[in-house]
Amino acid sequence: MPGRTNRLGLLAVVTTTVLAGACRQDMHDNPRHEPLEASTFFADGRALRMPVDHTVPRGTAHTDEHLYTGKIGGQLADALPVAVTPELLARGRERFNVFCAPCHGRTGRGNGMVVRRGFRPPPTFHVNRLRSAPVGYFFDVITHGFGAMQDHAAQVPVADRWAIAAYIRALQISQHASIDNVPADKRALLDAPASPGGGASEHGEGDRGKQGH
């Protein structure tokens, strides 16, 4: 039966081809070593190789101590490593309202929304201890956390930490400023209504008569 013979022959060829292909697993199980796997290739019997001495991972060569630690010579810096501009303060306010205001409140008095829901209140930024603290202190606390506050290094990049620190200092100045500190050509703005998203929006935080304690 020629037809049946042909079909059997074709089936044999296909089966042989599939089986032959199945024997080649180089692309699926290529010759490599997993981390910490033993190896006979190296004299110490380990597949894992140690990095070359003084190797620095890409993006971690933070040679500017002031910028990346908030310190100079191991001491907290009392100056910012970046220029203070309106853009920096605007960025600082926006990031502060996202990451800090829920606990610290928008004016930094420690009465944010989660505090009103029973969370432990942080200290107000307007006590003498924090008003006289170096600006590098706020950068350091954002980076490493302090007390009940966790660190925010993973959430807040270095540039934004400095922007927030600068804005905190501006908040401190604003809450203890007098009319004489305001340029004459800007004093009319003090009576202007607050813009949406800016200024004090929490209950009681717009009262200038309330000072930190």
Image: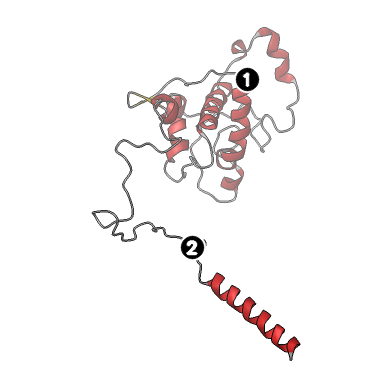
- The percent coordinates of residue 74 (x first, y second) are 33, 27
Residue 205: image quadrant is top right
Which residue of the protein is positioned furthest toward the bottom in this rendering? Answer: 1
Q: Is residue 132 left or right of residue 165?
A: left
Give neighbour class at mark 2: few <14, some 14-19, many 20+ (Cα, 10 Å): few
Q: Say what amino acid the circle numbered 2 marks.
A: Asp
Query: From what the image shows, is residue 7 above or below residue 134?
Result: below
Q: Residue at x 55, y 18 (%)?
A: 84
Specify whether 73 is left or right of 91: left
Asked if 130 appears above or below 18 in the picture, the reply is above
**Label 1 packing within 10 angstroms: few (<14), some (14-19), many (20+):** few
The number of numbered discs placed on residues in the rendered structure image is 2
Q: Quadrant of residue 8?
A: bottom right
Label 2 sits on a secondary structure element that is loop
Label 1 sits on residue: 86
Q: Within the image, what quadrant is residue 191 found in?
A: top right
Image quadrant in which the N terminus is located = bottom right
Is 99 or 211 nearer to us in this picture? 99
- Is the residue under label 2 in contact with that under label 1 (CB below 8 Å)? no
Q: CA distance from mark 1 to mark 2?
A: 60 Å
Q: Residue at x 63, y 22 (%)?
A: 87
- Name the residue that disc number 2 marks: 26
